[in-house]
């Protein structure tokens, strides 16, 4: 059996456990809501999960959860033309606020790693994709 890492919060009525995966998902969702983030950059495992139909909300997020704090690493791909420092700052604020509000953990840091730039598709590339879809539909 795989042991899941979690944070335990004692309360008057019992114990609340917050899994590291939950913190990763919160951070990932907060980061993807920022304008200028094209996608999260994850390893091959995340890509396989998406092909199988499961959306991996913690893709591109690495967290270390301590007793009272969390350290977050975010790996992103930005849209071409955005001001990267502004996007990174917005991600840091959004992730920090979301994690602290939802979990009660103090966020020590949010490091943003820009892994690539997403370029918009040209009209020619869009036309080529449309033709490929039409050809596929006709052959079925």
Image: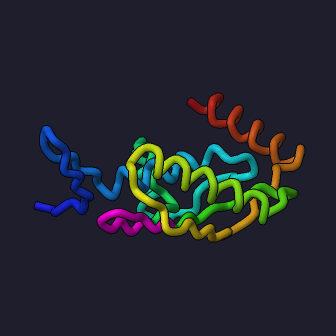
| Residue 119 sits above or below residue 113 on the image | above
Name the dominant secondary structure of the magenta segment. Answer: strand
**Is residue 64 a member of the stretch shown in magenta?**
yes
- Split into 4 quadrants, where in the image is the N terminus? bottom left
Pick the front one: 86 or 120? 86
As drawn, is 122 to the left or to the right of 108?
right
Query: In the figure, residue 114 lies in which quadrant?
Result: bottom right
Which residue sits furthest left?
1
Q: Is residue 109 above or below residue 96?
A: below
Residue 30 position in % (x across, y down): 56, 47
Q: Residue at x 56, y 30 (%)?
A: 140
Q: Answer whether residue 102 is magenta in the image.
A: no
- Judge from the rendering whether residue 18 lies leftward or rightward of residue 80; answer left or right: left
Q: Is residue 42 visible?
A: yes
The number of discs equals: 0
Question: In the visual, does 17 lie left or right of 14?
Answer: right
The front one of 119 and 105 is 105
Residue at the image point whose x is 89% and y is 44% from the top? 123
Residue 131 screen position, x and y as percent:
77, 38
Residue at 42 percent of width and 64 percent of height: 70
Q: Is residue 89 above or below residue 13?
A: below
Q: Is residue 43 visible?
A: no
Point out the stretch of residues depicted in magenta: 63-72
């Amino acid at each position: 059996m795989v042991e899941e890492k979690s944070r335990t919060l004692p309360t008057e009525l019992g114990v609340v456990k917050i899994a590291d995966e939950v913190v990763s998902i919160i951070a990932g969702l907060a980061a993807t809501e920022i304008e200028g983030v094209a996608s999260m950059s994850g390893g091959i495992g995340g890509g396989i999960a998406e092909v199988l139909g499961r959306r991996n909300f913690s893709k591109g997020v690495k967290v270390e959860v301590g007793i009272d704090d969390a350290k977050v690493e975010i790996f992103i791909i930005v849209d071409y033309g955005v001001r990267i420092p502004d996007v990174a700052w917005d991600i840091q604020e959004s992730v920090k606020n979301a994690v602290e509000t939802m979990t009660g953990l103090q966020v020590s840091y949010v490091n943003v790693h820009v892994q690539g730039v997403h370029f918009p598709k040209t009209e020619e590339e869009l036309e080529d994709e449309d033709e490929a879809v039409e050809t596929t539909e006709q052959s079925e």
